[in-house]
Image: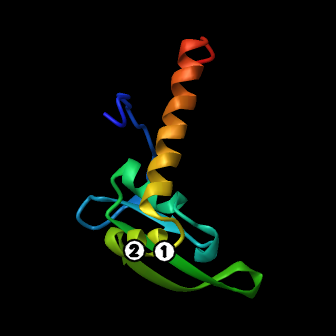
Amino acid sequence: DIDGYRVLFSAESDAVDESGFPVEIKTSNPRYWGTKVMFQMLSNGSVSLYTGTKKPRHMLSDVNVLPFQRVTEMALGFDEVGTLEKNIVSGMEILLAAVESGQI
């Protein structure tokens, strides 16, 4: 339950690691992630984020692995927890309104 709403999350993950745990893969610039990647990992159960660095011509030049905790620390630098909570509740209210109106 989130603020009185019961929510079922469904999400895809990009891959699984050698232990069979879901992981997320990104090659975009981390400054554009905000909290999106953190919430994506949370919803799909990813334990790690594999980030790729691209050279010109979109060639992969380097791969780094960040644990979920580090991704969370990076994301929370963008927003305060209160703001995140308000965003989640707002999203739940939008979903509830869509369900009640028959849109979904």
In what quadrant of the picture does the C terminus appear?
Answer: top right
Query: Is 88 placed left or right of 28 in the picture?
Result: left
Q: Residue 1 versus residue 68: which sits nearer the camera? A: 1
Q: Residue 43 versus residue 26: which sits nearer the camera? A: 43
In what quadrant of the picture does the N terminus appear?
Answer: top left
Q: Residue 73 got which mark?
A: 2
Residue 36 in percent (x, y) is at 54, 58
Residue 91 in percent (x, y) is at 54, 38
Secondary structure of residue under mark 2: helix
Q: Residue 77 got which mark?
A: 1
Instruction: Check disc 2 and give the amino acid type.
Output: Glu
Query: Residue 90 falls in which quadrant of the image?
Result: top right
Residue under the point 63% across and 16% down: 103
Q: Residue 51 versus residue 59: which sits nearer the camera? A: 51
Query: Residue 38 falls in which quadrant of the image?
Result: bottom left
Q: Do the residues labelled 2 and 1 touch (CB within 8 Å)?
A: yes
Q: Is residue 79 above or below residue 103?
A: below
The answer, for residue 40, to whether it is visible in the render is: no
Q: Which residue lies furthest to the left in this view?
A: 19
The residue carrying pointer 1 sits among few (fewer than 14), some (14 to 19) or many (20 or more) residues within 10 Å by Cα, namely few
Report the mark closest to the observer, 2 or 1.
1
Residue under the point 40% across and 68% down: 72
